[in-house]
Image: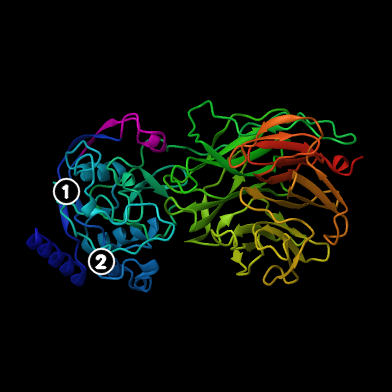
Amino acid sequence: MRKALSVLFLAVCAACTTVEVPVLVDIPAGSFVMGSENPPMPEWDEAPAHEVTLPAFRMSATEITNAQYEAFDPAHKSLRGYGGFSSADYEAVIMVSWADATAYCEWLSRRTGRSFRLPTEAEWEYACRAGTTTAYNTGDTYPEEFWKVQENTRFKEPVSLQVAQFEPNAWGLYDMHGNVEEWCINDYDSDSKAVRGGSHNTPVRFLRSANRSGSLPEDRSVLLGFRIVEAGPYTQNGESVYGRLKIGSPYTKKALSVDGALFAEPIPYVLAPVDGTPFYSHNHQPAVTWLPDGGLLAIWFSTDAEAGREMVVLQSQFDGESWSPATLFCKVPDRNMTGSALLTLDNGEILHFQGVGDAGEWKDLALAMRRTEGQTWTALHYIEPEQRVRHQVIAGPVVTSDGRILLCCDAGPDGEAGTSLHVSKDGGETWEDTGSIIKGIHAGIVELKDGRLMAYGRGNAIDGKMPCSLSADEGYTWTYSATEFPPIGSGQRLVLKRLQEGPLMLCSFGPDGLFVALSYDEGESWPVKRLLTDGKKRVLDGGAWTGTFTLDATHAEPKGYLACTQSPDGVIHLLSSRVHYRFNLAWIEGK
């Protein structure tokens, strides 16, 4: 085996030096059973298992290496060693998008007069299996001596990505399980391109032959590389897994009466799906906005573990009377989806902001966005594509008086990391991270009447109180002071919002639970404070980290991640992790 590897490396080296074709392996024509039958929930996209017949083709024996790729794109050498990975010539190339990989294939085709492209998912799985029907081409287990940090890691552990370190499969292909994930040519869904093979720094089950993943095509990650095939042209056949995501049919508005004070019966908005949509035990981090048809749209993540690849973003809609069962709203396959926000603009257009991980952890995320286009959503795309801290989206973006969109994101995974601010001055087309820090994670932000920005957050307490951050230069620098409110902690997220009637509203947590406060002087004082309860005794399920609690005259919900919108009829809709509260300004003021 050592001699065979030496021959392969010499061949690869020669290919790189002379810009020749990478070493290719003949893959015979044949049929195989693709996918898995009755896979567990997180791998539902592997079903149904089905027979596929393929003509013969040729596939590169290894993933494309740095040296091979940089013969096409010399500038890529500046990315060697990114994040501690892939420094040497014969390590798998990383930090390449789907378009980059496709461009390499087109370049190699022009240089050689032959036809190269990325493999289809079917070609990839067929070649990976090499006649096997087990979970891996090594059997039902993947030997630990081949592992490259096969666990979910918050801080990725550097490991060699040298190709062909271990034995090939029966057809002579190296590193089909692990090393780096590999781009495929076909769509996974309307947003993502298919990705196969699994990578370093990820649990071994994602390395199985049948496992399907995906990434937004502009993704550049330390987990992602590619290999090539020499084969005929590719035509996309069949429908994508998710299809174009719908906002839903317009509801007939069933508005509550808002004459005088309003406090409606609290109701759950997280309702289990009825259509087979993936639904897990932990439902958390809501966002909410009003719809032009008079309803509400709520979204949240559903997962078994917050550091989980199974995480999906679900949606429910409110028609003024009841919430619909949950349906799928957004998912990049096999990626963590922590952090969502919604914003309805004055023209009725809705913006959706989403954190997208490169694996299962939520420390490093890319920042993605899409917008409504009639009754559908545009494709999800990255507005800040680097997977790093400062990108965990917080619900509650705002539009300033001069049209800037302000989006807060947690600045890191630590509870004292603070909040980052991202700004768009052109309606969401381009974005800038101000580079500053707002005190407290999960911050809520408002524009004051004099143009300054004010934010309250969780953690970073000042003199034992919740911190206030003020900026007079559009969020590039901040000054800090203590508020009059108690700090909040684990399982809690506040709302800071300007009501359409003018006052500022804070919803947060104190010793007796969830309260609402009003300021009529731009945050200088908060003369109105009351628990969010009408005094009626109820036992409610708060979901997520809250669990069951008693709502009565002296106790309100003790925990919850809050999100809020005020619909044009003046009703304030406040969501905790599972409960939907409806009230108005007159009720807060006790009128």
Q: Is residue 5 left or right of residue 522?
A: left
The kind of secondary structure element at disc 1 is loop
| Picture layout, residue 470 above or below residue 131 | below
The residue lying at 13 percent from left, 65 percent from top is 11
Name of the residue lying farthest toward the right: 591
The residue that mark 2 highlights is 68
Relative depth, front residue between 474 and 411: 411
Callouts 2 and 1 close, C-beta under 8 Å: no
Q: Residue 252 location in percent, x, y?
A: 72, 28
Q: Residues within 10 Å of mark 2 (few under 14, many from 20)?
A: many
Is 45 included in the stretch rendered in magenta? Answer: yes
Q: Residue 355 location in percent, x, y?
A: 53, 53
Q: Quadrant of the C terminus?
A: top right
The residue lying at 73 percent from left, 32 percent from top is 266
The residue that mark 1 highlights is 169
The three-letter code of the residue at mark 2 reads Gln
Q: Residue 322 location in percent, x, y?
A: 69, 28
The three-letter code of the residue at mark 1 reads Asn
Q: Give the magenta range.
A: 36-54
Relative depth, front residue between 433 and 19: 433
Q: Is residue 547 left or right of residue 53?
A: right
Q: Residues within 10 Å of mark 1 (few under 14, many from 20)?
A: some
Compare marks 2 and 1 and give the one earlier in the sequence: 2
Image disc number at residue 373: none
The kind of secondary structure element at disc 2 is helix
One can see residue 319 in this view: no
Q: In the picture, residue 283 is in which quadrant?
A: top right
